[in-house]
Image (cartoon, grey):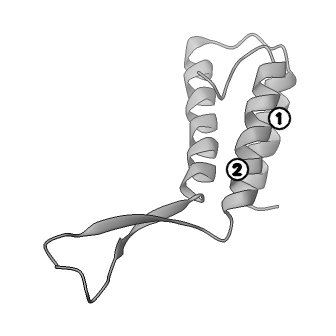
Amino acid sequence: MDYLQAEEEGLHHHLLAEEQLTDEQLSEEIERFRRIVLSACSSLGNLQLVTDSAQDLTERKMEYVPSEDCLASLKDIKRYIQEDEQGEGKWVLR
């Protein structure tokens, strides 16, 4: 099991658990879930400079290029939000 899968297991456990956490534990959990979601978001793709020899170099244009894992990342994000809506803590949407 890789790091992200282990983090997701923890996410699923806490989203469904009805635990009382201290403020410090709560902050740590929110930060951990934020890292999971940001990791999925960073896998969506990126902006790349469009190069066209016919264009003037002063008119630079950026274009979104989806990554190979874009669809899987979107599915993960959707699942995180659905699990979050079912749980008590609202860990992801905080």
Q: Which sits earlier in the primary sequence, circle 2 or circle 1?
A: 1
Figure check: 54 above or below 75:
below
Query: Residue at (59%, 27%) from the top-left corner?
Result: 30
Q: Position of residue 2 (x, y in %)?
A: 76, 62
Figure check: 59 above or below 36:
below
Q: Residues within 10 Å of mark 2 (few under 14, many from 20)?
A: some
Q: Find the distance from the CA under tag 2 to the CA under tag 1.
A: 17 Å
Q: Seen from this angle, which residue lies furthest front?
A: 54
Q: Quadrant of the C terminus?
A: top right
Q: Quadrant of residue 13?
A: top right
The answer to whether residue 47 is left or right of residue 68 is left
Q: Mark 1 is on which residue type?
A: His
Figure check: 41 above or below 48:
above
Residue to which mark 1 is pinned: 12
Figure check: 63 above or below 30:
below
The answer to whether residue 65 is left or right of residue 5 is left
Query: Residue at (65%, 29%) from the top-left corner?
Result: 92
Assign a secondary structure to mark 2: helix
Mark 2 vs mark 1, foreground winner is 2
Q: Position of residue 76 (x, y in %)?
A: 75, 47
Q: Residues within 10 Å of mark 1 (few under 14, many from 20)?
A: some
Q: Position of residue 46 (x, y in %)?
A: 47, 63
Q: Quadrant of residue 77?
A: top right
Query: Residue at (55%, 23%) from the top-left corner?
Result: 27
Residue 74, numbered label: 2
